[in-house]
Each structure stands twice: as structure tokens, then as C-alpha cells.
Image: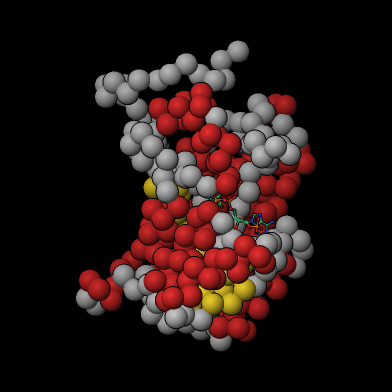
Amino acid sequence: MTTHTSFRLDGARILVTGASRGIGKAVAVVFARAGADLALSARSSAALKETAALTEEEGRTVVLVPGDLAEPGAAESVVDKAADALGGLDGMVHNAGMLPSHPDGSPVLDPFQDSAQEDWNQVLSVNLNATAALCRRAHRHLAASPRASVVLMSSTAGVIGTPRMEAYAASKAAQISLVRSLAVGWAREGIRVNALCPGWTRTDMTAFAASTEPLSDWLMAHVPLGRWAEPDEVACAALYLACPAASYLTGQALVLDGGTSVPDSGLAGIPKPPSPFAA
Ligand SMILES: NC(=O)c1ccc[n+]([C@@H]2O[C@H](COP(=O)([O-])OP(=O)(O)OC[C@H]3O[C@@H](n4cnc5c(N)ncnc54)[C@H](OP(=O)(O)O)[C@@H]3O)[C@@H](O)[C@H]2O)c1
């Protein structure tokens, strides 16, 4: 394995969920550049077509398998259509996920005791139940591949916990637990399973926080690198987990958060602005 080939996915057939925007869109482009053939999924067919157009110049096979992962049976249908269209599956980057938001796009950040059970149910349905259904259905295809890999897009929130985002954090922690169970359970079939845990990344999901100054400043004050991650940076880490360079890596959660999850002793002197959550 040379340095050049170890970071490539030539001919690998990969399902990418949440490929219509943000991190998933970046994953699709980076994976196509690395030589993968792709099945792209999300609810919006129009946005998936835009992602597919961005991959065109790489000359790879790209098929669209739209579906709403909150709907019963949708995950299974997405996997079946992807495998049918690509002639099998060598990998899956399950990246689709959601945070509850208000109609103006701002995230619901209520204290847990005031939060709604319906929001909890919705987050767990999309972020966790669909993950289980996708992995369960993809297994038969991955087991037939000599180079199978699953990457679940978890979150730093799943590692450190996050007040006011308890459902989201719990769903992402559960994904990490599932990764550890499946990695061992499927290891003898040669299927690697890992999680990627980004910190604050500049996408539609975080657009409100990024554009609301006291909140953005407050959040970035807790990121030692002092800035938002870009979707491409997350996509490159996903590529690493999926490609031959990581062929002995399984059951891990790679945290990509600019240092946020490292306890801040205070000795670095990073200034903290006034909290927007102060009463
Ligand atoms: N941005 C961050 O700071 C951050 C940090 C850590 C982890 N993450 C995780 O990274 C992943 C991608 O997030 P992002 O920031 O790129 O978010 P985003 O811009 O909001 O994109 C979310 C993606 O998920 C798809 N999706 C949402 N609900 C769906 C459903 N019910 N059925 C099918 N697809 C659905 C969306 O497509 P449609 O709307 O077209 O369906 C979209 O492609 C998520 O799992 C998120 O939790 C994000």
C-alpha cells in the first residue's frame, strides 16, 4: 500500500446519507475525488442533484436514493436501492441528522426540564432509530465486500454531553455505543465500524448560532482553535476512516473538535465573553 493508494477509494461503492447539504455534501465531493462510486440520500431530490453535479467532473457513478429517514421502512428502502443501483455496497457514511429547530431556523435550546417529549422522540427517531435500521439492512451487502467500512457521523456532543441539547447528545452518544458493539460483532466479517465526532461546523444546522454574535463568540471561546470547522475538514476525516489507510482501525470515535473536548485548565488564558445564557 503506497501513501497514494492508501488514501483512495477507487471503485468503492458507498452510500452517503444527508448528502444534500453541509457535511454530507462535502463528504460526497471528497469521496468522489478519491474514486468512490456513490449513492446519495436525503429528503430533497433537488438538492441531491446539486451535490451530484459537483461530483460530475470526477467521472464516477453517482445515483440518487432519496428518502425521509423519519418514515418507517425508509432506511431499508434507501439501502436496498443504493445496493441495487451500485451492484453492492463497500461502505456507508451515515451522516443525516437533525437538531430540533424553531420555524425561524433557530435551534430549540430550552433547559431540559422545559423541553418537549415530542422533540426528544423526533431526534431519537432520525438520529438513532434510522442509524440502527440502516446498519441492520446494510450488513448483508457489507459482509459480501472485501473492504467494508461504516462511518457514523456522531458529534462531540455525544462524547462530552451538551446541556440544552440533551436529546441530540444522547442520540450521538448512542451512535458511539453502537459503533463499539458493531465493530466487534462484525469484525470477523471484515467490516470496520467507526464514528466521527465533529465539533461546531459551519453548516445550515449551525447557521443561526454562527450568525448570532453573542452566541457565536461564546461558543468559539470554548474552542481552543478559536474557529468553526468547515465541512471539508470533516469530510477529509471521514475519508480517512473509510479508506485503506485506516484498515486496522475499528470501534473508534474520532473527535474532530478543535480541542473543545479537552478540559480547559484556564492556564492558556483564553478569554471568555459574557454568557448569552446568563439570566
Ligand atoms: N454542523 C455541526 O456543527 C455538527 C457537529 C457535529 C455533528 N454534526 C452532525 O453531522 C451531520 C450533518 O450535519 P450538518 O451540519 O451537515 O447538517 P445540515 O446541514 O442540517 O444537513 C443535515 C443533512 O441531513 C439530512 N436529513 C435531515 N433530516 C433527514 C431525514 N428525516 N431524512 C433524511 N435525511 C435527513 C438533510 O437533508 P434533507 O433536509 O434534504 O433531508 C441534510 O442533508 C449530522 O448528523 C449532525 O448531527 C454536525
Q: Can residue 73 be seen from the camera position used here?
A: yes
Residue 54 location (% of width, % of height): 49, 68
Quadrant that contains the C terminus = top right
Q: Is residue 268 left or right of residue 155?
A: left
Question: Between 5 and 158, which is closer to the camera in this rendering?
Answer: 5
The residue shown at (44%, 72%) is 32
Q: Is residue 170 above or below residue 21?
A: above
Instruction: Name the residue furthest left.
Output: 2
Instruction: Please state the horizontal and vertical placement of residue 169, each as a whole percent of the image.
Output: 57, 41
Give the image quarter of residue 5.
Answer: bottom left
What's the coloring here? secondary structure
**Is 204 placed above or below 225 here?**
below
Q: Nearer the viewer, residue 203 or 176?
A: 203
Which residue is found at the position 55% from the left and 41% from the top?
206
- Residue furthest toward the bottom? 87
Q: Is residue 189 above or below residue 109?
A: below
Left/right of residue 153 with respect to residue 76 in the rendered view: left
Image height of 155 relative to 102, above or below: below
Which quadrant is the N terminus positioned in? Answer: bottom left
Image spot of residue 25 (x, y percent): 52, 61
Q: Residue at x 36, y 41 (%)?
A: 258
How many marks the image carries: the answer is 0
Q: Is residue 242 left or right of residue 117?
A: left
Q: Residue at x 36, y 63 (%)?
A: 240
Q: Measured from the top left, where is residue 193 in percent x and y?
A: 46, 64
Visible in this render: residue 248? no
